[in-house]
Image: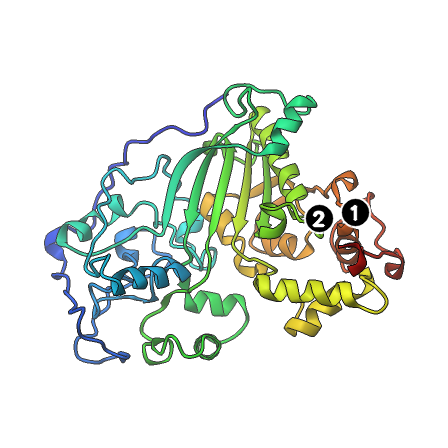
């Protein structure tokens, strides 16, 4: 079987422009603070972006750094919420605000794409598909002195997941030295991705106007980004949110091939369960099961993918999640499956803000067109994926024996509202008969 993916010599692309074709980069004065800028102002000359253009040089690089104020073509900053820590480093004198990263030897260990979805402006609206290849495709900009930064990094890793050692010991998995080692470690290719939103495309996904989206983002971030309103000529936005990580077992070259088996799980972050093993939900058991299925698929000559989104607590965050936990456990009638979603609605106003409409972009970036085994029960994720044209052959529920005792409430409530349980779960059960542990049991 082929290895995870070979180091690739950067492909020789025929450049459509050279360093001499570019304007000199602007150098911003770090001591000068401009509260906002306006479309058409003197000095406002953003690098053009043609979203979805097949040629990356026509599409244009994402410029979101502080070094080129007038030439920025994106609102926001690299690193999502972590940009605040960078500001602390600058404020404390530990980081030169004009520092430009040395990107030598940082190129991806595997070159994804380009795939047809990259040049379809409707298929990908929350990721810069060229974000891992900037030293190759935007070399002219870098040589000219522009501070263009990657929004995607691709590397390799050995994953030490305790449940895999159990699977080896119980002979559900057999080490092969390629995907799975004798000690239970698995070998993966992985990509970290920071979001880059194309605002017209995001607005279309949500069925609203671009103006409505910009106004909502401005208001709900407590007016952090005035340029959402004053710079309607800038269409890119780097939101202050977490990104995602993609883990791949097997040969990534096979991903676009519909005839080769592909197993996929899209997993939303749950720190309490994924990391610390909290038994109030099914997150870690389902993730572990998905990884095992991905390895099995890779050992059969296919490929397995886990897309891990930073959407803690259905994207409400852990504080809201824990408030909901307390409401559930303190309910007079007990922690009932019939009140599972109501408790979230009482605290947060809505049951879920993960908005899976944007989720398939990661799969489109990988060139996925067909998923043979989808390790998920979520109707929202399934609907969002197939709506983009990706075919799903089989949906795989979590085996009932993997569900922790206190998570029976979650699984019963979700199946009742449309989660796919196959013939292993009863969607018509009386939810008032499914109760989690009470406060006295803690």
Contact (Cβ within 8 Å) of mark 1 with mark 2: yes
Q: Is residue 108 above or below residue 95?
A: above
247 or 24: nearer the viewer? 247
Q: Quadrant of residue 239?
A: bottom left
Query: Where is residue 316 drawn, in percent x and y?
Result: 58, 65
Helix, strand or loop at mark 1: helix
| x 15%, y 61%: residue | 25
Q: List x then y, in percent, for residue 219.
A: 46, 80
Q: Up-down: is 188 above or below 390?
A: above
Residue 46 in percent (x, y) is at 24, 68
Q: Earlier in the sequence, mark 1 or mark 2?
A: 2
Residue at 85% x, 50% y: name it. Answer: 426
Disc 1: CA contacts within 10 A as few (<14), some (14-19) or many (>=20): some
- SS at mark 2? loop
Q: How is the model colour-coded?
A: rainbow
What residue lies at 19% left-to-right and 51% top-to-bottom?
Answer: 142
Which residue has dot 2 on it? 279
Decide if residue 181 is on the left or right side of residue 142. Answer: right
The mark found on residue 405 in the picture is 1
Q: Report how far apart the C-alphas of labels 1 and 2 lie in the structure.
A: 7 Å
Q: Which of these two is toward me, 153 or 208?
A: 153
- What residue is at 41 percent from the left and 50 percent from the top? 118
Figure quadrant of residue 79: bottom left
Q: Is residue 158 left or right of residue 66?
A: right
């Amino acid at each position: 079987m082929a290895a995870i993916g070979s180091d690739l010599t950067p492909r020789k692309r025929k450049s459509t422009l050279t360093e001499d074709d570019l304007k000199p980069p602007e150098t911003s004065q770090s001591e000068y603070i401009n509260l906002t800028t306006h479309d058409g102002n003197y000095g406002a000359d953003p690098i053009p972006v043609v979203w979805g253009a097949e040629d990356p040089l026509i599409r244009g690089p994402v410029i979101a750094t502080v070094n080129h104020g007038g030439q920025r073509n994106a609102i926001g900053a690299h690193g999502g919420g972590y940009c605040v820590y960078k500001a602390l480093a600058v404020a404390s004198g530990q980081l030169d605000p004009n520092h430009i990263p040395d990107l030598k030897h940082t190129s991806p260990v595997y070159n994804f794409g380009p795939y047809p979805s990259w040049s379809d402006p409707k298929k990908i609206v929350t990721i810069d598909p060229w974000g891992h290849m900037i030293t190759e495709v935007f070399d002219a900009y870098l040589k000219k002195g522009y501070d263009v930064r990657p929004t995607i990094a691709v590397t390799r890793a050995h994953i030490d997941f305790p449940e895999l050692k159990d699977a080896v010991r119980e002979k559900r998995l057999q080490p092969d030295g390629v995907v799975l080692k004798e000690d239970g470690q698995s070998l993966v290719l992985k990509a970290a991705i920071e979001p880059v939103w194309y605002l017209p495309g995001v607005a279309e996904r949500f069925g609203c106007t671009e103006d409505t989206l910009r106004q909502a983002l401005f208001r709900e971030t407590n007016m952090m980004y005035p340029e959402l309103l004053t710079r309607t000529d800038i269409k890119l936005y780097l939101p202050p949110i977490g990104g995602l990580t993609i883990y791949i077992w097997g040969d990534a070259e096979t991903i676009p091939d519909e005839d080769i088996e592909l197993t996929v799980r899209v997993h939303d972050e749950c720190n309490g369960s994924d990391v610390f093993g909290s038994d109030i939900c099914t997150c870690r058991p389902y993730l572990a099961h998905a990884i095992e299925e991905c390895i099995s698929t890779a050992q059969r000559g296919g490929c397995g993918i886990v897309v891990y989104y930073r959407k803690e607590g259905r994207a409400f965050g852990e504080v809201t999640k824990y408030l909901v936990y307390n409401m559930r456990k303190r309910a007079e009638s007990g922690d009932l499956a019939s009140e599972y979603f109501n408790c979230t609605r009482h605290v947060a106003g809505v049951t879920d803000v993960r908005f899976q409409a944007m989720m398939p972009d990661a799969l489109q970036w990988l060139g996925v067109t067909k998923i043979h085994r989808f390790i998920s029960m979520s109707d929202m994720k399934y609907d969002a994926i197939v709506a983009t044209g990706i075919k799903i052959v089989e949906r795989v529920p979590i085996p009932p024996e993997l569900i922790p005792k206190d998570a029976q409430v979650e699984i019963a409530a979700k199946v009742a509202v449309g989660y796919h349980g196959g013939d292993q779960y009863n969607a018509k059960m009386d939810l008032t008969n499914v109760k989690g542990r009470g406060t006295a049991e803690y």
